[in-house]
Amino acid sequence: MEQRISLVTLGVTDLHRARTFYEALGWRGQEVEETVFFQASGLALVLWDRGKLAADCGLPDERAGGFGGIALAHNVRSDGEVDEVLAAAERAGGTVTKPAATSALGFYSGVFTDPDGHPWEVAHNPGFTLAEDGSLTLPDFGGS
């Protein structure tokens, strides 16, 4: 696994409120499918419904002691690399909470948690370009 974080996804209870907050700080986001993406240098900050994010990570949305409302993402260059990273995480003592599969949006991903329960999505999304150094550039979604 290359040493890289591609996306930080915050689980939010009110998407509009969260987007308004970040935009008031000067950030500019693009909303796609009830998800807001902000380009943040070589990575992306993502805002998504907390319950949907927990479910997508294969975790219960428990406010106390369960899902912490944040997920890290590690984007890779192929579907095969998704499988390799998930297997390596499991060998290292992590738990695969969501086996790799093609999502409804068409990209291939799975999720593991580290020994402290922090979820990591491992994804191959051809629409999210990775530079040689692994930095991520969001596409122009063409929306607001």
Image (spheres, grey):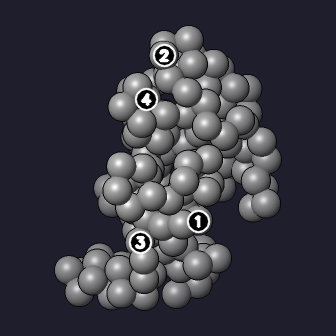
Residue 56 visible, this angle: yes
Mark 2–mark 3 distance (CA, rounded to whole Å) = 29 Å
Q: Name the amino acid type tagged 2.
A: Gly
Discs 3, 4 touching: Cβ within 8 Å:
no
- How many numbered marks does the figure carry? 4
Residue 10 location (% of width, % of height): 39, 62
Give the class, few, some or many, for how many residues have Cα within 10 Å of label 4's Cα (few <14, many ≥20).
Answer: some
Mark 2 neighbour class, 10 Å CA radius: few under 14, some 14 to 19, many 20 or more = few
Q: CA distance from mark 2 to mark 4?
A: 7 Å
Q: Earlier in the sequence, mark 1 or mark 3?
A: 3
Instruction: Please tell me whether residue 132 is drawn above or below residue 90 in the rendered image.
Output: below
**The residue under label 4 is which amino acid type?**
Asp
| Residue 134, position as x, y percentages in the image | 45, 36
Q: Residue 52 got which mark?
A: 1
First of labels 2, 3 by sequence position? 3
Say which amino acid is labelled 1.
Lys
Q: Secondary structure at mark 3?
A: strand
Q: Which residue is mark 4?
A: 114
Task: Say whether residue 139 is left or right of residue 137.
Answer: right
Placement of 50 over or under 72, stated as above or below: below
For the point 45% across and 58% down, the residue is: 62
Q: Quadrant of residue 17?
A: bottom left
- Answer left or right for 132 relative to 129: left
| Residue 94 image position (x, y, % from top left) | 50, 23
Q: Could you say which quadrant of the image residue 5 lies in? A: top left
Q: Which residue is mark 3?
A: 12
